[in-house]
Image (cartoon, helix red, strand yellow):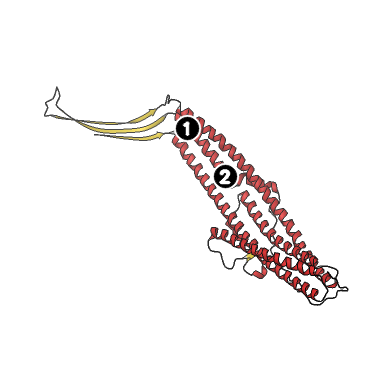
Amino acid sequence: WNLQLSQPVVRVANWIGIAQAGAQVEQAEAQFAQAESDLILRTAQAYFDVLTARDSVTVAKAQLRAVEQQRVLAKRRYDVGEATITDVYEAQSRHDLGRSQLVQALNDKESRQAELEKLIGALPDPLAGLRADVSLPAPEPADVGAWMGNARQNNPAVRTQLAAVEVAEKEVSKNRAAHLPTLDFTAGYGRNYTSGSMTSPADIENRVKSGTIGLQLTIPIYQGGAVNSRVSEAIANRYKSRAELEAARRQAATLARQAFGGVTSGLSQLAALTSAVTSSLDAVNANKIGYRIGTRVNIDVLNAEQQLFAAQRDLAKARYDTILQGLRLKSAAGTLAEGDVIAVNALLTEDASQTTPAVPAMPAASNATQSPQVRTQ
């Protein structure tokens, strides 16, 4: 019997493989960070989509109530000869359209809720909404170049590709190491039994013991071009990884620039829409007074109300979009974390009276008319 033991001592390819495994671990960690960031963004998007749909339902109901009030007023004025039948028809048309829009808004709300349920399971009840008094901060730092620079270095997709380049570099070195000698420690022990020979009787058994210990040096000379082929393939993959790294950096910088612009423009839009809601409410009140005294027709009131509710809906959506752009900006820069989710949660409240959109109260329809003249059809 024989026992052989071999222990590699110098295998350059194995040493390189250890370093390559470390780069693969870094790549997996970056991929996990990317998946975590994507999950946060998808969940936030789905959540605010539900809030947007819910706000659309709220606005549609408020608009329908306002149109109904105006329809009743138009009918009363027509009955006493102070309005035309056209006013009644216009109000009825807007009322029917409002009912259709409400049905559509309700269907969209159900669809958005189903999308959110796929991500988080059962929906919380009640679903917290964004506080109407929320003041959203500007990006810090306020330099888009700084955000783009961070994105080019720290974006999870960039870090994934950086690790991929390192893996590809090690693969080239590992394949080239196949040309290098290897050194192994070897040891062996054996025992052989022989009986009978020309110099010894057949009944005498000979026992031969043998033991070896040493170092074995193996020098590769030629392997039919297989090593060179693998090296060429690894070099090509390295070029590919480098190109993908540069593409990832450009994409990350673009995402950061777009998100930064989305936040800054969103903040400006919020200020404009807040003023638009106030002025639209004033316009509704003015048109209602004008309609009662005969200087405005019913369609003017209906248009003013529609503009008001559109401004309210747009203001609420602009708030959500600005928050989402802030999350996207941090995701692009590679800084999006659980703390950002907690910060967004702090902007929410379950008190429906404090959430956006805050539909302002409008004066109810009145029977009183002060029209200086009677209009007929």
Please give left or right for residue 47 compared with residue 207 in the image: right
Please give left or right for residue 230 compared with residue 144 in the image: left
* Distance between the alpha carbons at the discs numbered 1 and 2: 24 Å
Q: Quadrant of the N terminus?
A: top left
* Residue at the spot of label 2: 159
Nearest to the observer: residue 15 or residue 337:
337
Q: What element carries label 2?
A: helix
Instruction: Tell me residue 288's x, y (percent).
Output: 80, 70
Instruction: Tell me residue 316's x, y (percent).
Output: 69, 62
* Residue at the spot of label 1: 175
Q: What element carries label 1?
A: helix
Count neighbours of disc 1 (C-alpha within 10 A) and say few if under 14, some if 14 to 19, many if 20 or more: many
Q: Quadrant of residue 283?
A: bottom right
Rendered position, 154 above or below 92: above
Q: In which quarter of the image is residue 165?
A: top right
Count neighbours of disc 2 (C-alpha within 10 A) and say few if under 14, some if 14 to 19, many if 20 or more: many
Q: Is residue 132 visible?
A: no
Q: Could you tell me which residue is drawn at 69 percent across and 46 percent down?
A: 145
